[in-house]
Image (cartoon, rainbow, N blue to C red):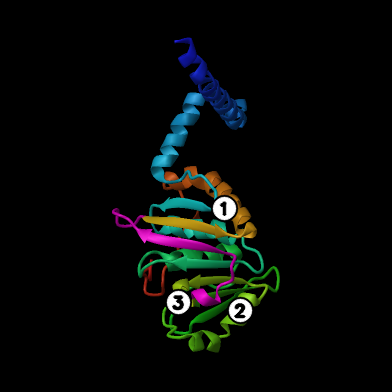
Amino acid sequence: MIRIFSAWAPIYLLMRLFAIIGKIASALTLLPEKRRGISTAHLYCRWVSRAKEGLYATVGQELKVLSHNPQHTWQIGFWLGDLLKGGDIVCLSGELGAGKTALARGIGAGWGALEGVNSPTFVFVHEHRRARDSLRLYHLDCYRLASEGDALSIGLEDILASSDVTVIEWPERILSFLPDEHLWIGLEQVEVADQRLLTFRAIGTRYLTLLEELHRNIESGAESVGTGKMNAESRIPLADDGERSDL
């Protein structure tokens, strides 16, 4: 009996040590909230509520966010666009109607584009400017690119090598041209009609930092979005005919 206990003692002590470390980490995580007078029980309930809404996510190389409607998708894009810097490359991947254009419009608005961002399907590239500096935002739609020759004809290599911001729809068509480091966003339709699952994948140090910043933006705006409260500037623009296109 003593021998069995002696054999298991190191494992038992190690498990106890992990449990203690876990409690300390949890206490440190909750400390800022508890200082504001929020009880641990209330904080846990709020965390569960956000998790069910898809508004609370853990950031590593990947971040998943559930968008409840096109306005929410636009708002997430706005938060992202506000964080983009020169040289950033953002890839939007998803089937027709997955919400790429709604997200791209939000990105353009958050970045500060002087005119609304719409799908550039028939011209491949739209170039946008903003008032505060000379940076440009290139919005590419690669759906109709049939070959590498087509990609070269629109100056793709020069755009990707520039110090401007590039947002790409249908990036699967130009994988051989993409730089090693970029932000990849996959959009998927889910069972509920207007909901979309957005999966952000950060490839490279810059984009890991960007993902952390986006996570903080989403968290800070989660409560207003989760309850359906949107600011006037957060309403997704409608197309000229009053219909939303390619949401």
Residue 201, image x and y in percent? 51, 58
What is the span of residues highlighted in magenta in the rendered image?
Answer: 175-195
What residue type is disc 1 on?
Leu
Per the image, the residue denoted by label 3 is 173
Category of crowding for the residue at label 2, using alpha-carbon neighbours closer than 10 angstroms: few (below 14), some (14–19), many (at least 20)? some
Per the image, the residue denoted by label 1 is 214
| 223 w.r.t. 209: above or below | above
Disc 3 to disc 2: CB gap under 8 Å: no
| 230 w.r.t. 154: above or below | above
Residue 147, image x and y in percent? 45, 86
Instruction: Let me know if residue 176 is in the magenta part.
Output: yes
- State the CA–CA distance, disc 1 to disc 2: 24 Å
> N-terminal of the two: label 1 or label 2?
2
Q: Is residue 50 left or right of residue 216?
A: left
- Between residue 134 and residue 180, name the one nearer to us: 180
- State the CA–CA distance, disc 3 to disc 1: 27 Å
Residue 117 visible in the picture: no
Residue at x-position 47% and y-position 25%? 41
Residue 23, image x and y in percent? 55, 25
What residue type is disc 3 on?
Arg
> N-terminal of the two: label 3 or label 2?
2
Residue at x-position 49% and y-position 57%? 200
Mark 1 vs mark 2: in front:
2
Outermost residue to the right = 133
Q: Is residue 216 left or right of residue 68?
A: right
In the drawing, what numbered circle is on residue 159?
A: 2
